[in-house]
Amino acid sequence: MNRFYAFFLIALATILYSCSTKPAHPQSDLINQNSATGMNEVSIRAFANGIDTLLNTPASQKTFSLIYTLGEETLYAEKYSNADGSHIYITRLNTGGLSKFIKKYYFKKDSLILVTINHVQDTDNGQVLNDTKTYLRNNIIFKRDGRTAANNDALRKLPYTAISPSENGTFDENYPQEIQTLNDALQQKNKFDMVFDHITTYPDATFLMLKSKIPNGYNASLHLQEKDALIDSLLRFPAEFKDERLKLKWKISNQEAIYVPSGTTSTSASGLNR
């Protein structure tokens, strides 16, 4: 009897533990898996959907870049990171107004598992919309699907179909280089290392203009809706700050970077990262 009672207690404890550790969200088990090695197309999509539900929530840490311009091209990047190590990069690229991309890179810890692209191309016959999903395992592409339509409603109704590799039997993307570019944009490094250029004042708006340290590189601007000690100094003594890197804060609203004042009464030097 004692042996049966002990077995009963062990079985009951096992059941209670299983109930207490049941995932609170249908996709929690996919998000919390330790490895991305065994994930397939279905589990990758489910994982990405779970990450999407956490965007712009307290559970996700967000970082974002300035809006960079180079000729007619604009580039903007965001990164959302979760406590479990999963993260997603989102970049918006506009190439001269005729071609617009939104690219998303989904990571399971350090493993890139999915890249999605939404591409809008303006043509003489109207817009062409294209969606692609690229699935990776061990950072190697194993499947790519796509669909194309003339508008969003038609696009959503279409199924994805398989896309074959190029003639050499491989896909040619360099995703590590793309991710490095996004990290540089988020951290203002290398070709995105921005320094003060000048302040431009129009009748209805004033902008703080930044430029890359690299000649003929990217530029960026911040709309000055409020002033602080730093902005006052830049307006009064712009030559003293020319080509200096400034320690700035900004927010993004209506596809525009807006300067966020420091709110401090200290001297303008506190707004510099020399």
Image (cartoon, grey):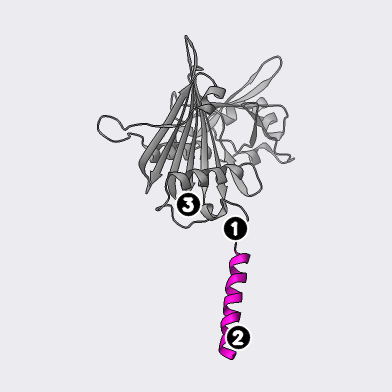
Q: Is residue 18 magenta?
A: yes
- Say which of 274 and 54 sits in front: 54
Write down the region rendered in magenta: 1-23
Label 1 with label 3: CB-CB less than 8 Å: no
Query: From this viewpoint, which residue is outermost toward the bottom?
Result: 2
Q: Amino acid at mark 2?
A: Tyr
Q: Quadrant of residue 11?
A: bottom right
State the residue position of label 3. Answer: 109
How far apart marks 2 and 1 lie (CA) works out to: 30 Å
State the residue position of label 2. Answer: 5
State the residue position of label 1. Answer: 23
Question: Residue 246 location, x and y as percent?
Answer: 58, 36
Q: Amino acid at mark 3?
A: Lys
Residue at position x 38%, y 47% from top?
137
Residue at position x 60%, y 47% from top?
61
Q: Quadrant of the N terminus?
A: bottom right
